[in-house]
Each structure stands twice: as C-alpha cells, then as structure tokens.
Amino acid sequence: MTTEVSFRAVPGPGFVAGCQVATWLAAGALDAAVAYTLIGHAPPRRPGETAESVAAGLMGMVDGMGLRPAVERVPIAGARLIMRGPFVALDYGHPEFVMRLPATGSAWRRHVAAGGPVCLTVGLDPIPPGAGPDAVEAYLARVAATNRAYMGATTVRNR
C-alpha cells in the first residue's frame, strides 16, 4: 500500500498581491471579542492564471499556516501576526515574505495587541474586489457550506 503525499508550494508576493483581505472585530461567546481575517483571491485575471492555479496558491497558504477545513475544530496556527504601529503583516508560511493586511482598523489592532485571538479564514472561491460586509457574510456562508473554507486561530508574534 502506498500513500500519496502532495506538497503545495507557498506562493510568493506576486500571488499574494492579488488576494482580497477583509478584517473585522465581533463579539464572541460570553461577549469576548474575536478578531476575524478573511483571505481570498480575486477572479483569475493575470496571464496564465486559472481558477485551478488560484486555488492551488491559496491551498499553499493553507498548508503553510497549518489551517484545517472550516467544518473541523479550529486549530491553533501559531503566532503569525506581526504588528508595527498601524501596520499588520501575516506570516503565511513563505520562507522570505509576509503578507501585509490592509485597513485592519484601530479596534482590531488594539484587540490583537492585547493578546486577543484572531480567527483566520482562507476561502477558495473568488471574492469580488470591493465586497462589503453583506457580501463577505454571504461569501463565508457559501464557502463554509461547500467545504471551500479553511480556518485557524492566530495571535500576535512577540519580537
């Protein structure tokens, strides 16, 4: 009996530049706040880019961070957030590069700086650029229901 093992490459900055990111802060269980980060990708638009190549790049990020399908228990993905003043970056598993998270908001940053948890989700379906809160909520429901969402919990990394 042979076991097939596949290794997906963690994509570089060219791929990450095409990612769509949404962050928000919401009340969780027992009124404890939870910060959320959703990462997806715009529909294929670069030469040679296909839905399959985009999904493979996102799965490389999933593997690099140790995320699990959203239907499973959310794993601890380790301390992956790097904060420097108003700037936040995510160690998404690449050996040389990090991903800057745009427009996290001051309440989100205060929560994370105080050690609060962040629920990180990578969705495999395309996210249209400029999607608002209602579109993001519908997107999350759809990708979770179709097993195309991967999650993990992360926190800020100490220097």
Image (cartoon, grey):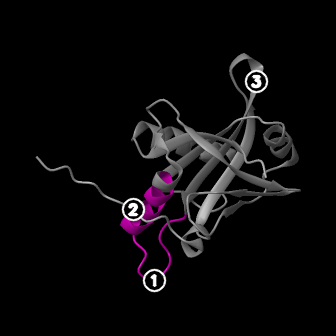
**Which secondary structure lies at badge 1?**
loop
Q: Is residue 104 magenta?
A: no
Residue at horizontal 27 percent and vertical 54 percent from the top:
5
Distance from Cα at disc 1 to Cα at disc 3: 45 Å
Pointer 2 residue? 8
Name which residue type carries label 2: Arg
Q: Position of residue 145 (x, y in %)?
A: 43, 37
**Which secondary structure lies at badge 3?**
loop
**Which secondary structure lies at badge 2?**
loop
- The one nearer the camera, 136 or 28, is 28
**Can residue 109 be seen from the camera position used here?**
yes
Name, please, the residue furthest toward the bottom: 47
| First of labels 2, 3 by sequence position | 2
Residue at horizontal 50 percent and vertical 50 percent from the top:
123
- In the displayed structure, does residue 7 sit left or right of residue 125? left
- In the displayed structure, does residue 14 sit left or right of residue 89? left
Residue 134 sits above or below residue 41 on the image: above
Q: Position of residue 67 (x, y in %)?
A: 50, 44
Q: Which residues are magenta?
A: 42-62
Tag 2: Cα neighbours inside 10 Å, few (<14), some, or many (≥20)? some
Q: Is residue 52 magenta?
A: yes
Distance from Cα at disc 2 to Cα at disc 3: 36 Å
Pointer 1 residue? 47
Name which residue type carries label 1: Pro
| First of labels 2, 1 by sequence position | 2
Tag 1: Cα neighbours inside 10 Å, few (<14), some, or many (≥20)? few
Residue 44 sits above or below residue 90 on the image: below
Residue at horizontal 61 percent and vertical 46 percent from the top:
136
Residue at horizontal 89 percent and vertical 56 percent from the top:
85
Name which residue type carries label 3: Ala
